[in-house]
Image: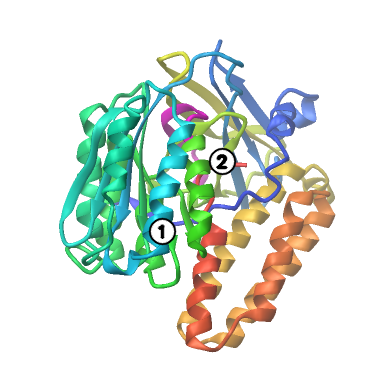
């Protein structure tokens, strides 16, 4: 049996979130050229629209090609005033000694304020952790504000940081009322290093993977500059959750409000994308999503799909030399998911089609502008991660050069494909290249910002 290859990749930020998925949907419904560039499908009365397409749907005949397949899972807008799934949320709050004063006060205020986002029938629990873990609010309906407010009021800073145990206890509370028809979420808040119990990125990542398998995602929120961002990013990434860095304690309430608000916008969950490459097409790597590659089969998952957002990744494949002209299938894409609004399982299947030509100019002329831009964004995030590694290794000049190159490539892609979504990421890349500091203390802050820029909107879509 072939051994699985895990394809590590990085997702893009909310660059140009105002650009809705309508343009992507239209591509799959237009004239024959666009139909070749992207095919799409929506099940009857489904909350999800699936689209697949090639960045370059026309490949050069008579030679080996590298092709890029974009798979999009787009959440349809929920009907105004219609039903939405219940939320099942546990907030895990660090109460270690470093959280004293304004930090713990802001954590209390932020949690109380954010709970206003939930409906009375939603489920809430609150856990506090330091050397020990206490359940301040057992899983209860959000309508029980008296018990919830009283539990949060007991939150006081004191001991160490048993982060792993805090997440485990939160998971126990979520499991009490977990359901496939609910959005099950942990929101983890910390300002320091995990120093009690399992504390490596690998251990927290494994915990995140286990929770993702149960349909529970973990959003990680960092306060200040004293934490291990690699650990928190890995926990969020492996559980299909969001990671962010909150520099000022007073900004915590706004983030928690946004995070709980996003819970109410989920329209589908438990999405599995399986791509079977055809003969002569071999998967190489995945950008934008963790995925497994076993032989010619690629499998990726989305824990949740938000309404009005496009969630996607890109598969890079190698295509053998094709002498014959005309069209052929490179792969079949099978997407299964649980539609929360319709409360049913659903499945959509689509082919990945390519044409071959002897004319080089036709390859670029018929490139899909939107997919080419999205590929550029994913490559830029991967380049930022590489720059972080170079800086960590002491190659300060190499990291700067890579970020500058990143900016130039994003600007060129934005001009070529007329896509404004790439302008802000290009500007950020150039600013990073100019301001990256050789001083360890300053790099500690910058590194956290860089990781946030790649991962704070992780997996949330455009």
Camera sees residue 277: no
Residue 174 against residue 292 in the figure, above or below:
above
Q: Which residue is mark 1?
A: 233
Q: Residues within 10 Å of mark 1 (few under 14, many from 20)?
A: many
Instruction: Tell me, yes or no, whether the highlighted magenta stretch contains residue 280.
Output: yes
Q: Place residue 431 in its image quadrant.
A: bottom right
Q: Which residue lies at the image location 31% right of the left edge and 46% below the top edge?
A: 153
Q: CA distance from mark 1 to mark 2?
A: 19 Å
Q: Report the number of discs.
A: 2
Q: Which residue lies at the image location 57% right of the left edge and 14% below the top edge?
A: 81
Please say if the residues under marks 1 and 2 sit with CB atoms less than 8 Å apart: no
Residue 142 against residue 191 in the figure, above or below:
above
Q: Which residue is mark 2?
A: 312
Q: Position of residue 243 (x, y in %)?
A: 45, 54
Residue 221 against residue 386 in the figure, above or below:
above
Main secondary structure found in the magenta portion: strand
Q: Which residue lies at the image location 18% right of the left edge and 52% below the top edge?
A: 133
Question: Which segment did they paint magenta?
Answer: 263-282
Please give left or right for residue 10 compared with residue 180 in the image. right
Q: Residues within 10 Å of mark 2 (few under 14, many from 20)?
A: many
Q: Quadrant of the C terminus?
A: top right
Q: Position of residue 173 (x, y in %)?
A: 22, 36
Q: Place residue 42 in its image quadrant.
A: top right
Mark 1, secondary structure of its residue:
helix
N-terminal label among 1 and 2:
1
Q: Position of residue 274 (x, y in %)?
A: 43, 34
Instruction: Tell me, yes or no, whether the highlighted magenta stretch contains residue 55.
Output: no
Q: Position of residue 12 (x, y in %)?
A: 59, 53
Which residue is at the front of the view, 56 or 46? Answer: 46
Q: Which residue lies at the image location 45% right of the left edge and 20% below the top edge?
A: 339
């Amino acid at each position: 049996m072939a051994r699985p290859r895990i394809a590590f990749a990085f997702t893009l930020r909310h660059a140009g979130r105002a650009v809705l998925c309508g343009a992507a949907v239209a591509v799959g419904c237009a004239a024959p050229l666009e139909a070749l560039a992207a095919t799409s499908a929506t099940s009857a009365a489904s909350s999800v629209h699936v689209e697949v397409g090639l960045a370059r749907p026309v490949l050069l005949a008579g030679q080996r090609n590298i092709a890029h397949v974009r798979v999009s899972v787009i959440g349809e807008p929920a009907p105004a005033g219609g039903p939405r799934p219940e939320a099942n949320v546990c907030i895990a709050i660090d109460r270690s000694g470093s959280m004293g004063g304004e930090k713990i006060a802001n954590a209390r205020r932020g949690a109380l304020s954010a709970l206003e986002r939930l409906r009375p029938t939603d489920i809430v629990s609150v856990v506090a952790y330091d050397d020990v873990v206490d359940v301040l609010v057992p899983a209860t309906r959000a309508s029980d504000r008296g018990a919830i407010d009283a539990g949060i009021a007991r939150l006081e800073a004191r001991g160490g940081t048993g982060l792993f145990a805090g997440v485990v206890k939160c998971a126990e509370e979520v499991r009490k009322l977990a359901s496939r028809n609910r959005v099950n979420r942990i929101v983890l808040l910390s300002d320091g290093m995990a120093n009690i119990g399992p504390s490596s990125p690998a251990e927290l990542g494994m915990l995140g993977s286990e929770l993702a398998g149960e349909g529970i995602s973990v959003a990680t929120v960092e306060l200040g500059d004293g934490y291990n961002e690699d650990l928190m990013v890995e926990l969020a990434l492996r559980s299909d959750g969001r990671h962010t860095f909150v520099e000022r304690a007073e900004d915590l309430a706004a983030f928690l409000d946004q995070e709980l608000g996003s819970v109410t916008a989920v329209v589908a969950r438990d999405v599995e994308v399986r791509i079977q490459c055809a003969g002569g097409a071999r998967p190489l790597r995945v950008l934008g999503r963790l995925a497994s590659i076993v032989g010619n089969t690629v499998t990726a998952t989305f824990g949740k799909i938000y309404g009005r957002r496009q969630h996607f990744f890109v598969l890079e494949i190698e295509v053998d030399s094709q002498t014959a002209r005309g069209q052929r299938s490179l792969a079949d894409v099978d997407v299964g998911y649980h539609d929360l609004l319709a409360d049913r399982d659903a499945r959509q299947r689509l082919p990945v089609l390519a044409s071959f030509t002897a004319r080089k100019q036709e390859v670029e002329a018929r490139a899909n502008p939107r997919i080419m831009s999205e590929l550029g964004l994913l490559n830029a995030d991967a380049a930022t991660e590489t720059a972080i590694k170079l800086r960590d290794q002491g190659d300060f000049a190499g990291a700067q050069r890579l970020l500058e190159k990143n900016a130039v490539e994003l600007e060129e892609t934005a001009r070529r494909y007329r896509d404004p979504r790439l302008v802000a990421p290009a500007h950020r890349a150039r600013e990073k290249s100019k301001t990256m500091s050789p001083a360890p203390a300053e790099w500690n802050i910058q590194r956290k910002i860089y990781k946030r820029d790649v991962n704070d909107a992780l997996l949330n879509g455009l």
